[in-house]
Image (cartoon, helix red, strand yellow):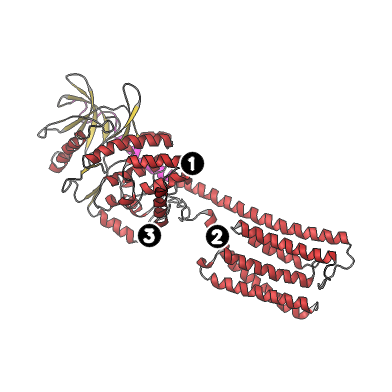
Amino acid sequence: MGGTTDRPRRFPEEAPTLVDALASAPLSETAVDPSVSDTGSGSSRAGSASTSLITAKETLELQEIHRTRMFVRVAIFMAAVQALALAFVGGDPIAKGIFLGTLAATVAACVWIAWRLVQDTGYTTRRATIVAFATILGASGGVWFYGVFSPAPVIIPFGVYFFSAGQDRRMTTAVYATCALVYLLFAALLLSGAVPDHGLVHPVGLTLLERIVIIVVVETIYLASFVVARSSREATLYAIDRHDVVVRGLAQRDALLKEARQDLVQALQVGGIGRYTGEVVGPYRMGKVIGRGAMGEVYEATRLDNRAEAAVKLLHPQLLAEPDLVERFFREAKIMGALNVANVVKILEAGPSDAQLPYLAMERLRGEDLADYLRTHKKMGLRKVLTLLRQVGVGLDAARAAGIVHRDLKPRNLFLARLEGGGEVWKILDFGVSKMTAEEGTLTQGMIVGTPANMAPEQAQGETVTHLSDIFAMGVITYRALTGVPPFSGDTPIEILFRVVHAMPGRPSELASLPPQVDLVLAIALAKDPKDRFGSAADLAQALDAASHGRLDGALRQRAERLLDDLPWGSRG
């Protein structure tokens, strides 16, 4: 068999208790997922060095809330100063009364929004708009009282800049346009002589042209305030996004380094001379080691009578005294022998149960496993992933029909075999920890078996596993292949298990160039509750194919959106 037989880590029966303990621990006491970007309310954010759980726009919204709190305080203070100043100046009594009324309206609106903003949730665009137009009213009253050609209009750019930095483009444009049009209307009325100028400051000695120039300058200042504020917002958004890209890249690199370290350990264990190299076991002569795991070694072998190649798996000598492990070794042969399909590695023969050295002979495969492929290419295109899912799905359907759950699907156990006549085919390897659903028990009772990063949540918690647990593992593999980043990683097995059970990784389309609907497909594939997942790998492949063309079924879209409402990408539930 080409590639390794990387055996999964096994955890003692208290492991579910540790996961449960982590579930009840404060998030501040747990490490941050280096594979998510957490991205939070629908955003993807990663990491051990993690970005935030909110998007750049949501970050600016928080800033906007705090800026609004400051603005209303300043506006109230300035209104109070203006009201006090009116006691020391003359001017038209009617214009003064109108100004006082507009100042009162401004203060009332600011006090109201300040009361609403005691909690961040009190902020809405609609409420901010009410305050914006209330302050425009107050400023307009001041312009009319002091005079269109007085210094009073210079206060308006302050408000224009503040509100133009907001996130709602329609609201900010409306605020700027209102300020510009109100000032232009006042100026036009006075220049045309339609109304007398009752302003405190009169443009004595100014020609018509000079007045027009002043109006144009003021309007230009308003426009500049609006443009600079919008540009500043876009620049801030860009800076935050770039920061997140860098941090997310570092987090992804960290996750890939951890994965690479595991692959390196595996690679160092294969190739070269093994304990039984050159020895004859049954009808086979052992060659070099091509795989090594917790339970045994896999040797390149040649059959003595016809020189046929094979891959022979031998149990570690130190485990021969463990009857349960020996029984599980032969049980793997029974399970794999029952799956006579092209997408499961073929069993040639198994040694007799009373053999001094148990062996399992399998077809010798040439090619590479998915782990090696991803280490070289980082990720796969959608078309290749669809081929993988469809072919592996055939093997999983056969396993399901035989009542078998693999329980350890991962890149190392999916092998792309090169066929003698040309072409390639994906094959499932290593059923050493698989479970037969018809059994009353398994040979792994009291243990969580499998590879932590690829376990389904129910498997990680020591609960009953079904074929849907394998579908979750295929979702993990699909996420890893498409994004180039493992969805769940950590420094310890328990840390990884916690994330598998309680967290969602970063949004896939933010980690790689993927159609948006692919996010929805992977949300279903990685659903925490088995009943929310796809029923088979074929269903997953069909949905992924439709999503790649933007034609995902409406019912599936609704299911995915419901799941993401409950547990968004990048969240740690």
Mark 3 is surrounded, within 10 Å at the Cα level, by few (under 14), some (14 to 19) or many (20 or more) other residues, namely few
Up/down of 237 relative to 411, above or below:
below
Which residue position is annotated with label 3?
29
Residue corresponding to mark 2:
61
Q: Is residue 335 left or right of residue 167?
A: left
Q: Which residues are magenta?
A: 253-279
Q: Is residue 151 visible?
A: yes
Q: Secondary structure at mark 1?
A: loop
* N-terminal label among 1 and 2: 2
Foreground residue among 298 and 382: 382
Q: Quadrant of residue 176?
A: bottom right
From the image, tell me which residue sits under label 1.
513
| Mark pair 1, 3: CA separation | 34 Å
Tag shown at residue 27: none
Q: Amino acid at mark 2?
A: Glu
Residue 382, image x, y percentages: 43, 37
Residue toward you, 165 or 543: 543
Few, some or many residues within 10 Å of mark 1 (<14, 14–19, 20+): few
Question: At 72% from the left edge and 79% from the top edge, which residue is drawn?
Answer: 84
Residue farthest to the bottom, as pictured? 87
Q: Quadrant of the N terminus?
A: top left
Q: Between residues 514 and 561, which one lies in front from this camera angle?
A: 561
The residue drawn where x is 58% and y is 64% is 126
At which x and y percent is residue 442? 18, 46
